Amino acid sequence: MFSRYVLVIVSLVDLLSDFHVSCCDYNCANKTVFTPPRLVVKHGDRTSSTCSLCPSCPKDIFDVEKSVGYNVKNESNITVTWTVEKMMEWKTTPKCYYTRTDGVQCCTRLNITVYKLPDLVSVSLLNHSGPLLESRNYTLLCEVQLVAPISNVNVTFLRGHTELGQKWNSNNLQKEPVTEVFSLGISPTKEDDGAQYWCRAELELGPDGPQPPPMVRSENVNATVHYKPRQLAPSPPDLITLTQGDRLELNCTAEGNPSPSYTWTSLPDGVPPSSSNVLTIESVASGHEGQYTCSVSNYVGTNTVMFKVAVKPNIILPIVLAVVVFIACLMGGIFYFYRQGRIGNYNLKDVFRLHQQHEAVPTVECGKV
């Protein structure tokens, strides 16, 4: 029984020692001073601060009120060192106090921030899985699990190395670890196809906290963006004019995700259907004149390209053919007459007669030497 009474008395003394500063004046002209004045301690770590009494302050009643840890006074009773070997509380505010001669207790608070890094930071899309559609609105979520204090957490959404918008923080003043989800609206474009979305949570605890601020990041979410076809080939002129015999090439190449299909419609008579991105006719004729329509489609949408083709007659070709025929006829006639002139029409008698005449010897008149 005696031991129980002793235990009760000791407990009451400790309670009264912590209770007697319940009515503190924090505006006294002469104050006690904590060194350091602010502690930033990781949950579970050791921490300590020393309170110094002002030179003109009475020393009779001078101590540190605390809920955890222990105090050690120096021999001159002008400093008290408060120490916690393993900080496990989230809300604790030690007070250094002394009592003036008029009975007023002057107090100074020690500002303590106990922090804990997030267990996990994850990024996801709200109520969505699979590919994203261009220009649709989606919501990115960044969940920060069991972090303290949540009000000191800055959350940033990123696409690759690019920050998206401002940093987000919480208005929750709770000191214990909590889980909170932050959100950001996005509207992806074609350029976002293949991008990596992620988020990071930085615990910014001021100059007294760890530097740089500790950060925990999420895994990446790889975005696949589906978008309607977009034309890659140059826009065609209002009218494509060709000459008969020219080569016709109509290009409606486009890009899209998923890969688009090509359909040629409204083709002139005689032009077969095609599913190619380029429609080619090696030698156009007058029947190829008209309108060509190329439709490029995927499930997101369709892009349509119109081509109008005019074919004019080739007036040079008949002239060239006539000249060629004329020259051929002329050369044939010349060759014919030349051959006739070389061979001629000879009689065999004329040949012998001509031979005899060549052997005759001219005579000389008598008396004329």
Image (spheres, grey):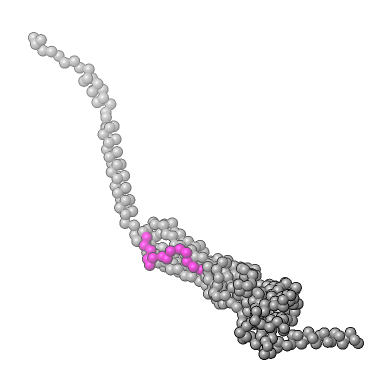
- Decide whether residue 352 is among the magenta residues: no
Q: Residue at x 30, y 49 (%)?
A: 323
Q: Position of residue 26 (x, y in %)?
A: 64, 85
The answer to which of 218 and 153 lies nearer the viewer is 153
The answer to which of 360 and 325 lies nearer the viewer is 325
Report the span colored magenta: 229-242
Q: Find residue 58 and report its image quarter.
A: bottom right
Q: Position of residue 237 (x, y in %)?
A: 39, 65
Q: Find residue 103 and report its image quarter.
A: bottom right
In the picture, measured across the screen, residue 22 lies left or right of residue 318, that is: right
Q: Residue at x 51, y 68 (%)?
A: 229
Q: Position of residue 162 (x, y in %)?
A: 55, 68
Q: Residue at x 22, y 20 (%)?
A: 358
Would residue 125 be visible to someone looking at this image?
A: no
Q: Find residue 209 and report its image quarter.
A: bottom right
Would residue 322 be visible to someone looking at this image?
A: yes
The answer to which of 242 and 322 lies nearer the viewer is 242
In the picture, measured across the screen, residue 368 lies left or right of residue 194, that is: left
Q: Quadrant of the C terminus?
A: top left
Numbered circles on residues, count: 0
Q: Quadrant of the N terminus?
A: bottom right
